[in-house]
Image: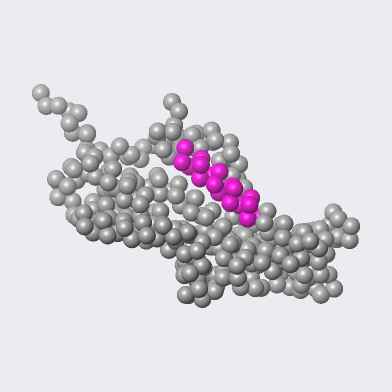
């Protein structure tokens, strides 16, 4: 009698099954920090999308008669400017709200560029002959050996200071992480039965790479994307603070810090609020990334 079980051993171990999202959410919500981070992330995303409707003023609108007005709860403050104004009389709340747009734009664009290039390169390295794999990985090792912010500064100096060039530089800096992660996942999957069966069945290389193997490598890549999102926000803020990212009067949080640093003793709010916005956003995304890692990694799941 034929062994019926032999006909099922070619199925990928990560086949999507009904209720998979419910299972993921069950594990994800066990991490309370991740759930809080998720809701904070959604709040900032909502603010970024509807910034023109939420912000009480245009981010670049100046009121020369209301420069360095303190927050509303301090002496001299007014609820017209709840978080005060900057040295040019611009509303801090409006600039912070519009700054969320730039931060989320940077995170999204950087993750898309870095993940796309990194995944493709990692797939090529995983399927390539040994000599080509070695060349690709040594190039990635060289990039990783250079401090990320220093490399981003060099690239922006070559391309020219701007928000677009800062995003390109940060994407290049983050790409090796995706390459190494994708290659490692591909190498793990290549030895499994379902890949061997696909090879025997005559699957062409593109189908083998993108249809058979890649979907089963996405879990760690999703976690890396979440962490890269927060790294991109931090790096672009650092470049903006150094004058190599977004240029004034763009209401990007790092640029706002750079414009206001000379007033830190006279008007603490012009530095504190952009710094808090960066801190809370990055912390929320990192907490959410930890929850994604716990929910997507079977080894970390509790029975």
Residue 266 vertical position relative to residue 31 in the rendered view, above or below: below
Q: Is residue 23 above or below residue 205?
A: above
Q: Residue at x 43, y 63 (%)?
A: 172
Q: Nearer the viewer, residue 244 or 226?
A: 244
Question: Is 88 inside the magenta-drawn segment?
Answer: no
In the depicted view, which residue is nearer to us: 215 or 267? 267
Q: Which segment did they paint magenta? A: 277-294
Total number of numbered discs in the rendering: 0
Magenta part mainly helix, strand or loop? helix
Q: Residue at x 14, y 26 (%)?
A: 3
Q: Work out whether 61 lies above or below 172.
A: below
Quadrant location, the N terminus: top left
From the top left corner, tell me how far across and down residue 221 is, in percent.
Answer: 40, 49
Residue sitting farthest toward the right: 75
Residue 131 is situated, as x and y percent measured from the top left of the image, at: 21, 57
Q: For residue 259, say whether it is visible.
A: yes
Name the residue located 36 percent from the left edge and 37 percent from the top edge.
17
Determine the image quadrant of residue 278: bottom right
Q: Nearer the viewer, residue 239 or 38?
A: 239
Assess whether residue 279 is covered by the magenta stretch. yes
Q: Is residue 226 left or right of residue 124?
A: right
């Amino acid at each position: 009698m034929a062994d019926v079980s032999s006909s099922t051993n070619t199925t990928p171990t990560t086949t999507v099954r009904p209720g998979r999202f419910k299972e993921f959410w069950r594990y994800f919500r066990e991490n309370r920090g991740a759930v809080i981070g998720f809701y904070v992330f959604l709040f900032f995303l909502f603010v970024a999308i509807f910034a023109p409707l939420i912000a009480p003023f245009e981010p670049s609108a100046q009121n020369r008669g209301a420069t360095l007005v303190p927050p509303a709860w301090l002496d001299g403050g007014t609820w017209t400017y709840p978080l005060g104004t900057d040295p040019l009389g611009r509303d801090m709340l409006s600039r912070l709200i519009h700054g969320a747009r730039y931060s989320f734009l940077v995170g999204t664009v950087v993750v898309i560029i870095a993940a796309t290039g990194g995944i493709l390169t990692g797939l090529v390295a995983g399927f390539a002959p040994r000599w080509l794999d070695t060349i690709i990985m040594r190039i990635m090792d060289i990039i990783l050996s250079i401090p990320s912010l220093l490399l981003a500064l060099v690239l922006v100096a070559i391309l020219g200071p701007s928000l677009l060039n800062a995003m390109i530089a940060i994407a290049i800096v983050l790409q090796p992480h995706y390459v190494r992660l994708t290659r490692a996942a591909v190498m793990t999957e290549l030895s499994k039965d379902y890949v061997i069966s696909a090879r025997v069945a005559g699957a062409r290389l593109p189908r083998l790479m993108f249809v058979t193997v890649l979907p089963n490598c996405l879990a760690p890549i999703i976690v890396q994307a979440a962490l890269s999102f927060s790294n991109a926000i931090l790096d672009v803020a650092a470049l903006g603070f150094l004058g190599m990212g977004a240029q004034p009067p763009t209401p990007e949080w790092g640029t706002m810090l750079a414009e206001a640093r000379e007033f830190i003793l006279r008007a603490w709010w012009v530095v504190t609020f952009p710094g808090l916005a960066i801190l809370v956003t990055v912390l929320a995304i990192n907490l959410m990334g930890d929850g994604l890692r716990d929910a997507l990694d079977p080894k970390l799941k509790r029975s």
